[in-house]
């Protein structure tokens, strides 16, 4: 039933990862070329040696240690309202704007409000399986992370793409200059079959960190049209230039309709550990647990224990601030290189991707492309072969209709060590 056509052809990862060879510069798939920080890796090694239970099944909800660490370390940032559900009601009919709740929420319930999943992908997939009926529509602000498409269409759902409009001039632009098409968004919410939005901040691939004002406008629409929100916040600890990540669930009227997804892989440079989580009100998390139990039953116990230690230690180690500084340095190296080449880009303010307008690069018409390569991947293929730089074509992150607009754009990752930290510093005893 799931055909290549249903997935719009071979996925971009399977197409571009094989183009990576030892001497090339791999700025493609977003994973790091360094190990997790020593305090997290050490916890994994120690637990592996000293404990038996970490090699076996966990409770399907996730290791208690990880759920407790999440509740303790990031619980307050959700600013959850009191357990009285009606406290989260917010009336937008009079034009009132939902505010961010007061600093301290009442704390997350480790039994009912946190679900550990097989990566963030696992959380999104389980949530879509739990809530979508065939024919239901789900909005993406597009460009969007490509996995969302199949997570919706495999369940019989239908993506509705609402554009994030590019800045008039790419050169000198910042990710914040990509703007939501608010009229298109409201029209999408008005569609009778529209049920949910998958909303991503900090944003992959744009690096946009949505402002409070943008979140408030979005929240008003979600409340007005009674929509479910899947908030993909996997890059929440990666914001640059003093930008602040704000959780949409922390706005009035949003907790009860939002599932927030996070990632141990992104947080601790451990993308292969496949540890993610979903946080939200009990009535939304319970169905995610039901699905998760039937798909993977539980996640990797050992990695989850190490992530728990990571969350509990990270603040004390000054890890998050150091990690941000190192990413800012990597971003600068890449931007300087692009400046030297004269290729315009949008400066990312979060996550670890940069969108580059590569229109200046001319692809020869008679270039020997493989016959099965999708035509809109040609520029990326040509750059991989000729410049030995692997990227991900931006067309992987847009709808079929928007492919022509993005054919000259490439996404480059800067979660790659360039001698400004990474594994080297671990060995020197630093945090990274
Ligand atoms: N999030 C990563 C990226 O965008 C990894 C992709 C994936 O999960 N296949 O590169």
Image (tube, rainbow, N blue to C red):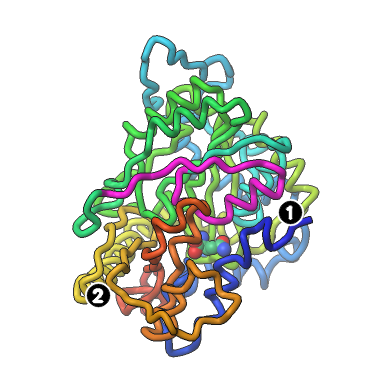
Q: Is residue 330 visible?
A: yes
- Image quarter in which the C terminus is found: bottom left
Q: Nearer the viewer, residue 334 or 391?
A: 391
Residue, far bottom: 23
SS for callout 2: helix
Rate crowding at label 1 as few (under 14), some (14 to 19) or many (20 or more) other CA atoms within 10 Å.
many
| Residue 183 lies within the magenta run | no
Circle 2 or circle 1, nearest the eye: 2
SS for callout 1: loop
Chain part drawn in magenta: 141-167
Q: Which residue is mark 1?
A: 298
Q: Position of residue 300 (x, y in %)?
A: 68, 61
Q: Position of residue 74 (x, y in %)?
A: 48, 43
**Which residue does the image show at 51% across and 54% down from the upper left?**
145
Q: Position of residue 339 (x, y in %)?
A: 20, 70
Q: Which residue is mark 2?
A: 337
The circle drawn on residue 59 is none
Q: Position of residue 340 (x, y in %)?
A: 19, 75
Does label 2 point to a residue whose CB lies under 8 Å from ligand 1?
A: no
Identify whether 329 is placed above or below 78: below
- Image quarter in which the N terminus is found: bottom right
Identify whether 92 is placed above or below 59: above
Rate crowding at label 2 as few (under 14), some (14 to 19) or many (20 or more) other CA atoms within 10 Å.
few
**Which residue does the image show at 64% across and 46% down from the upper left?**
152
Identify whether 75 is placed above or below 123: above
Q: Nearer the viewer, residue 379 or 427?
A: 379
**Which residue does the image show at 43% across and 33% down from the upper left?**
184
The quadrant holding residue 108 is top right
């Amino acid at each position: 039933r799931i055909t290549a056509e249903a997935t719009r052809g071979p996925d971009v990862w399977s197409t571009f990862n094989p183009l990576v060879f030892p001497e090339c510069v791999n700025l493609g798939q977003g994973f790091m070329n360094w190990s997790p920080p020593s305090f997290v890796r050490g916890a994994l090694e120690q637990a592996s040696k000293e404990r038996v239970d970490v090699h076996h099944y966990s409770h399907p909800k996730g290791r208690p240690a990880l759920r407790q660490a999440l509740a303790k370390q990031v619980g307050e940032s959700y600013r959850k309202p009191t357990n009285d559900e009606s406290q989260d009601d917010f009336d937008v009919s009079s034009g009132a704007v939902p505010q961010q709740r007061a600093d301290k929420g009442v704390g997350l319930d480790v039994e009912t409000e946190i679900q550990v999943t097989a990566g963030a992908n696992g959380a999104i997939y389980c949530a879509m399986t739990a809530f979508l009926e065939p024919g239901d529509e789900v909005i993406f602000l597009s460009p969007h992370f490509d996995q969302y498409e199949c997570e919706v269409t495999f369940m019989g759902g239908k993506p509705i793409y609402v554009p994030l409009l590019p800045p008039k001039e790419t050169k000198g632009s910042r990710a914040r200059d990509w703007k939501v098409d608010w009229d298109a968004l409201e029209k999408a919410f008005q569609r009778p079959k529209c049920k949910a939005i998958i909303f991503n901040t900090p944003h992959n691939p744009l690096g946009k960190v949505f402002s409070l004002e943008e979140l408030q406008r979005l929240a008003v629409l979600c409340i007005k049209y009674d929509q479910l929100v899947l908030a993909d916040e996997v890059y929440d600890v990666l914001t640059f230039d003093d930008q602040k990540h704000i959780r949409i669930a922390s706005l009035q009227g949003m907790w009860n309709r939002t599932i927030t997804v996070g990632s141990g892989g992104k947080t601790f440079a451990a993308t292969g550990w496949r540890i993610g989580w979903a946080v939200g009100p009990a009535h939304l998390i319970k169905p995610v647990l039901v699905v998760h139990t039937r798909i993977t039953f539980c996640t990797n116990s050992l990695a989850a224990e190490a992530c728990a230690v990571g969350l509990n230690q990270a603040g004390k180690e000054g890890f998050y601030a150091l990690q941000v500084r190192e990413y800012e340095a990597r971003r600068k190296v890449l931007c300087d290189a692009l400046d030297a080449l004269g290729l315009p880009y949008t400066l990312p303010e979060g996550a670890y991707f940069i969108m580059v307008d590569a229109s200046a690069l001319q692809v020869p018409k008679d270039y020997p492309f493989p016959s099965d390569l999708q035509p809109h991947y040609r520029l990326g293929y040509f750059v991989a072969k000729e410049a030995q730089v692997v990227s991900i074509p931006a067309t992987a992150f847009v709808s079929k209709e928007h492919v022509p607009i993005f054919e000259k754009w490439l996404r480059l990752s800067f979660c790659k060590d360039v001698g400004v930290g990474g594994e080297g510093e671990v060995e020197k005893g630093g945090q990274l």
